[in-house]
Image: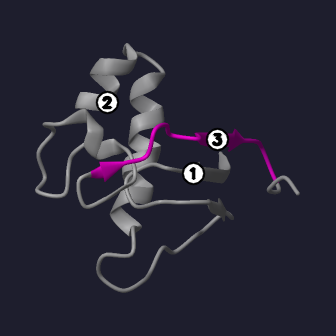
Amino acid sequence: MLTRLRVSGFKNLVDVDVRFGPFTCIAGANGVGKSNLFDAIRFLSALADRPLINAAWSVRDADGRSTDIRNLFHHIGDDYVDEMRGINLIKGWGHPAN
């Protein structure tokens, strides 16, 4: 069971730390990153059985397509961050880790 996800530099997600319970509802205004949070989870899942480049291509961009891999990185206008600082997946059984 996924209990925690930390993301920084993935799409519009910067320093995001989400703890999941047995039932977690993701809600928020349009454009705040709900879909990008799920894209981060899909990206990690794809990394489990695909090379990095193929996993990156499997993630959609804002228009629902997978095109420019740079779109996985946080950017403002045409300026992209130099690196994705990390997506940490914390899996466990039972209660979320502290």
Q: Is residue 63 left or right of residue 60?
A: left
Assess whether residue 4 is covered by the magenta stretch: no
Instruction: Give the structural element (helix, strand or loop) at label 1.
Output: strand
Residue 49, horizontal then vertical, whole percent:
42, 16
Q: Check disc 2 and report the residue beneath it.
A: 56
Q: Are marks 2 and 1 in contact (CB under 8 Å)?
A: no
Q: Is residue 4 left or right of residue 68?
A: right
Residue 44, horizontal then vertical, whole percent:
48, 34
Residue 68, horizontal then vertical, whole percent:
17, 36
Q: Are marks 1 and 3 in contact (CB under 8 Å)?
A: yes
Quadrant in which the N terminus appears:
top right
Residue type pointed to by label 1: Val
Residue type pointed to by label 2: Ala
Q: Looking at the image, is 15 positioned above or below residue 23? A: above
Residue sitting at x 39%, y 28%: 46
Q: Check disc 1 and report the residue beneath it.
A: 7
Residue sitting at x 62%, y 51%: 5
Q: Looking at the image, is 76 positioned above or below residue 3? A: below
Instruction: Give the structural element (helix, strand or loop) at label 2.
Output: helix
